[in-house]
Image: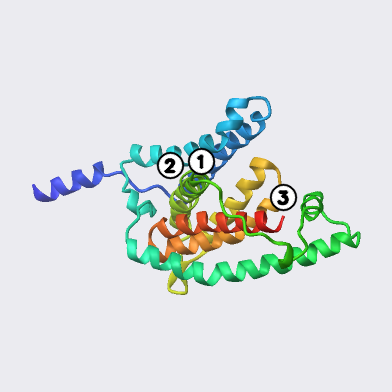
Amino acid sequence: MHDEADTDQQRQRPHPPSRRAVLVEALLVFGASTLVCAALWQLRAVSGFINRNLQAFIAAIFLYVPTGLLLRRKEDFADYALTVRPVKRGLLVFLVASAVVFPLFGVGFYFYYRAVCAAASRGVALPAQLRNLCHRYVGGLAGARLRLPTSIEQVAGEFLVVALPEEYFFRGYLQSRLEVVWPSRRRLLGAPVGYSLLVAAALFGLGHLLVDGDALRLAVFFPGLVFGWMRQATGSILAGVLFHASSNLVSRVLHDSFF
């Protein structure tokens, strides 16, 4: 009797989907979500309502689509790193990464635009976006003026409307599904890494390109690698959300201060 009951339970238990099925699901969810975001981006030009609320609409897509899938399948959100735990480890990873990366980024930012804008002044052919930016360049440290965010809404928006939804979707849902397809078998600084991290970062960059058509947006592939590593190192999106938002704020302060 015992054996028969166990057999019945095994028959009733659904088989886990194949790796191919998981990959197809992940790509379809990415493609459909990106398509809707791109459509909203185009509609902003003809609808003031969409233009004013564009980021909120995109945030809702990135939050609600994965949530709906997980709730329907009754899955544990922690299995997708959609948790703040372990809090201490997440905060530590964020603080150490910030202490290392942001000073280096600031130095790189300064010398990069110093060289680029010097080249622009000599008539070197550059993309229109860089030429327009260099028209406003203050010329160096002497002309720079520190300009911090002017409102708490700007800061909160970077955390709640930009970083959280993007990390929730790309590092929480998408990277977790890709981890099923390509389990991480190597380690980098103590964190398991593999093709799932690389592909998630590539889709992160591709998604930005497909939404607004700006090829320079592909560069977010590189911070996407850092956000993905943080998710792997901590088992949570907490560090990624904090670092993502802080990176955007640091970049904004530098641009506002030099341009």
Marks 2,1: beta carbons within 8 A: yes
Residue located beneath label 2 in the image: 66
The amino acid type found where label 1 is placed reads Val
Q: Which residue type does callout 2 highlight?
A: Pro
Task: Tell me if residue 199 can be seen.
Answer: no
Does residue 240 appear anywhere in the picture?
Answer: yes
Which residue has dot 3 on it?
Answer: 215
Q: Quadrant of residue 191?
A: bottom left
Query: Left of 52 or right of it: where is 229?
Result: left
What distance separates the C-alpha of mark 3 from that of mark 2?
27 Å
Query: Measured from the top left, where is residue 48 in percent x and y?
Result: 62, 26
x, y percent for residue 196: 50, 59
Query: What residue sits 73% from the left and 66% below the top?
Result: 142
Distance between the alpha carbons at the discs numbered 1 and 3: 22 Å
| Corner quadrant of residue 221 | bottom right
Relative to 231, is 73 above or below? above
Where residue 102 sits: x, y (%)? 56, 67
Quadrant in which the C terminus is drawn: bottom right
